[in-house]
Image (cartoon, grey):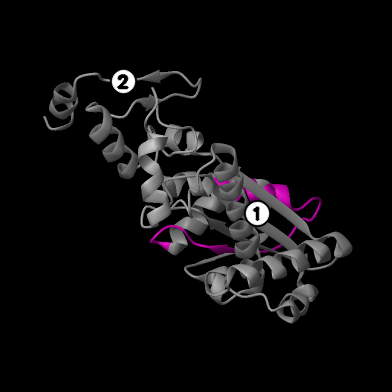
Amino acid sequence: MRDYSIGVDEAGRGPVIGPLIVCAMSIPAEDYPILKEMGVRDSKILSKGKRESIYKLIIEQAVERNWGMGIIVCEPSRIDNNRSSSNLNELEVDLFSEAIINSIDNYESGSIFLDACDVDQERFGSKVRLKLGSEWSEWKIFSEHAMDSSNSLVAASSIVAKVTRDDAMQKLSDEIGLDLGSGYPSDPKTRSSMERLVSGKKPHDCLRWTWSTVERAWTDLHGTPVPIRHENNEISSQTDIRHWIEGNHK
């Protein structure tokens, strides 16, 4: 039986706009040299053009060589709903596990490489193992910070995740008719789009309502706390800012 490896990374953990993307790629371990030949490296140190050209090569090889790929698009609504009962680290455990399960079929053992999202890298790996369950007990899991810099399969996953997120942001910009930039609060284009995105009866669906950037922009414009997002798309709000302040500072 061939030895398989799965590499997992994410893109879009910190932005205030758009989805969080997690990609898991599975390949026969013998195919690692192909990734190096493509020039696969950590997506953060590649130019946009280089990322996109390598992404195309990865997709071509994935089709030709039957590599597995699990891509999870976590929309802002899921991020916000998760915040009411958990935190982003726990959500990423779920997302990494979902991506891994979607990346491969019928292989009973191998190695999984995670770019750890938790400050405690070993804890992150243990939680992913627990989430995967007993069916994955024969797989070895390696969880390290910045593994996209040391493992070319994780780097390939980071490229796919990053390009997928960039495409999602461009699609949002086109749909809204406004250049949203990268979606990160530090991006001037993103900051300048905030007033329009919070100008309606509720924040725009592309926003992460529980992010402090949205809360400040909404409160500055409306004088009330940002509405609470619910899974059924209903919203609840406190119309008096004083009640909100009192409720959060008792």
Taking depth in this image into account, of 13 and 223 the one nearest to the observer is 223
Residue name at image x 52 percent, y 69 percent: 44
In the rendered view of the protein, which quadrant contains the N terminus? bottom right
Q: Relative to 107, is 79 on the left or the right?
A: left
Can you tell which of label 1 and label 2 is closer to the viewer?
A: 2
Relative to 84, residue 159 above or below: below
Q: Residue furthest front?
A: 177
Q: Give how far across and how far down residue 230 sits, in percent.
A: 44, 24
Query: Which image quadrant for residue 40?
Result: bottom right
**In contact (CB < 8 Å): disc 1 and disc 2:** no
Name above or below for residue 212 compared with residue 126: above
Task: Name the residue tied to disc 2.
Answer: 237
In the image, what residue type sits under mark 1? Ser
Q: Is residue 81 visible?
A: yes
Q: Position of residue 136 (x, y in %)?
A: 67, 52
Q: Answer whether residue 133 is visible to the viewer in this image.
A: no
Residue type at mark 2 is: Ser
**The C terminus appears in which quarter of the rendering?**
top left
**Label 1 sits on residue:** 137
The residue drawn where x is 40% and y is 38% is 86
Residue 218 image position (x, y, % from top left): 30, 33
User: Where's residue 82, x and y in %?
Assistant: 44, 36
Residue 119 in the magenta stretch? The answer is: yes
**Magenta region: which residues?**
95-120
Secondary structure type for disc 2: loop
- The residues tagged by marks 1 and 2 sit, at their Cα atoms, a distance apart of 45 Å
